Amino acid sequence: MDWKKPTVQMLGRWQPWHDGHQALFERALAKTGQVMIQVRDVQGVGDNPFDFITVSENIETALKSKGFEKGTDYDIMLVPNITNITYGRGVGYAIEEETFEKEVTDISATKIREEMRKDGKL
């Protein structure tokens, strides 16, 4: 990870990492060649059962299975429970919303957690 190189930031809970997150990551990586995945510290807040270590391991496993390399293509960091991103004027970065086809947009981590509970995996 080159800290001076343009980097895409992905901020989220990732509870759990799923195919929609994977699609977003791949699009983000195509923009600059590296992504900083920031994990909000939300275990135990609302319906967020996973701690940072579990979230990180889930992300690393998924990305490694697709051939992405931690430390080169991406890195992961814990951040506070960020709920607002604020800026005052043009400050040298863009905040962009990516849009995907309905199949990806409809993926719901809430529904995934419900299924995990039913299956005794949570």
Image: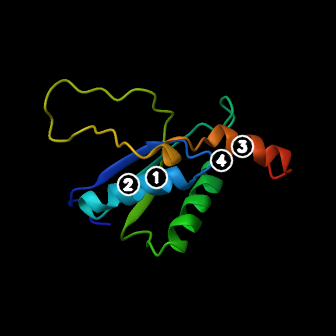
Q: Which residue is mark 1?
A: 77
Badge 2: residue crowd in 10 Å (few <14, some 14–19, many ≥20): many
Residue 110 placed where, x, y %?
Answer: 66, 37
Identify the residue at the far bottom of this view.
67
Give residue 113's position: percent from left, percent from top: 71, 43
Seen from the viewer's position, the closer of residues 72 and 78 is: 72
Q: Which numbered disc, 2 or 3, marks the residue that appears first in the sequence?
A: 2
Q: Which residue is mark 4?
A: 51
Sequence order check: which comes first, mark 3 or mark 4?
4
**Mark drawn on residue 36:** 2
Classify the position of the N terminus by image quarter: bottom left
| Position in image of residue 24 (x %, y %) | 42, 52
Look at the numbered discs 2 and 3 and tell me whether their residues touch, using CB distance below 8 Å: no
* Residue at disc 2, secondary structure: strand
From the viewer's perspective, is the residue at label 2 or at label 3 nearer? Answer: 3
Neighbours of disc 1 within 10 Å: few (<14), some (14-19), many (20+)? few
- Residue 114 lies left or right of residue 11; in this view the side is right
Tell which circle, 2 or 1, labels the residue nearer the N-terminal end. 2
State which quadrant residue 114 falls in. top right
Residue placed most toward the observer, 47 or 75? 47
The residue that disc 3 covers is: 113
Check the image and tell me how it is coloured: rainbow
